[in-house]
């Protein structure tokens, strides 16, 4: 039951109609640690690190915000109760507001288990396969999926532009090619 509540809140909270969403103005971004934004790999590693933690452990939301471009979005996708595919676009602050209570209550560790990336000029697209655990000692993840992460380099640093994800389901298992580590 806890699994379904957490997955529903984190991924399937996207069931609200798009018309109910309002565009919030971009929140000023705090300065990022140079090591967090030096390379595409560093940004992705920092992203996983900053959202992960045991129950009761506060996340460093300033660090989280510093990874994202002021216009960035996070987009969970999934199925609503009627079985229709849905996606929601939220700002980093909306993600924090929606996710923080569950992250603190349940504990949440997300880690990359494989990735593929493509680069052209200042943009990089990373397909990052993840697994989610409540505790690092859990014998099995409670969820897996793929994060589609778009990054941009402005000449000074790398920014997360978007994170778009889908959890694995019996009807949509992760393809084998997304489980092999690649560059």
Image: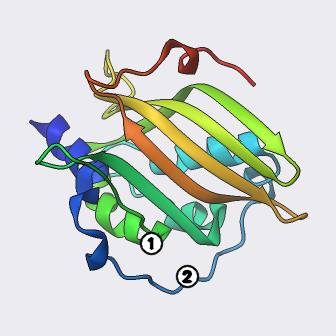
Quick check: 22 above or below 114? below
Q: Which colour scheme is used?
A: rainbow
- Residue at 11%, 48% (x, y): give it: 81
- Residue at 31%, 43% (x, y): give it: 107
Residue 159: x and y in percent read 71, 60
Q: Which residue lies furthest to the front in this view?
A: 84
Left or right, 23 with reference to 82: right
Residue 11's disc is: none
Residue 89: x and y in percent read 42, 64
The residue that disc 2 covers is 27
- Residue at 34%, 69% (x, y): give it: 97
Q: Can residue 52 be seen in this view?
A: no
- Residue at 76%, 55% (x, y): give it: 37
Residue 168: x and y in percent read 35, 29
Q: Closer to the N terminus: mark 1 or mark 2? A: 2
Q: How crowded is mark 2: few (under 14 residues within 10 Å), some or many (20 or more)?
A: few
Left or right, 81 with reference to 152: left
The residue that disc 1 covers is 93
Q: Is residue 20 visible?
A: yes
Q: Which residue lies furthest to the bottom in this view?
A: 25
Secondary structure of the residue carrying tag 1 is helix
Residues marked 1 and 2 touching at CB (< 8 Å): yes
Q: Residues within 10 Å of mark 1 (few under 14, many from 20)?
A: some
- Image quarter hosting the C terminus: top right
Q: Nearer the viewer, residue 46 or 91?
A: 91
Residue 13: x and y in percent read 25, 57
């Amino acid at each position: 039951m806890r699994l379904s509540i957490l997955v529903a809140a984190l991924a399937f909270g996207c069931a609200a109609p798009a018309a109910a969403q309002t565009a919030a103005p971009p929140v000023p971004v705090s300065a990022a640690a140079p090591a967090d934004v030096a390379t595409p790999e560093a940004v992705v590693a920092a992203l996983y690190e900053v959202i992960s933690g045991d129950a009761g452990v506060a996340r460093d939301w300033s660090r989280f915000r510093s990874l994202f471009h002021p216009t960035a979005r996070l987009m969970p996708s999934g199925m609503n109760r009627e079985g229709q595919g849905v996606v929601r676009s939220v700002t980093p602050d909306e993600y924090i507001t929606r996710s923080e209570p569950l992250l603190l209550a349940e504990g949440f560790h997300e880690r990359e288990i494989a990735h593929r990336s493509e680069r052209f000029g200042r943009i990089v697209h990373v397909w990052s396969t993840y697994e989610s655990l409540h505790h690092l000692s859990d014998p099995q993840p409670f969820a897996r999926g793929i994060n589609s992460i778009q990054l941009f380099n402005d000449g000074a640093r790398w920014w997360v532009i978007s994170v778009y994800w889908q959890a694995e389901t019996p009807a949509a298992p992760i393809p084998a090619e997304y489980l092999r580590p690649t560059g």
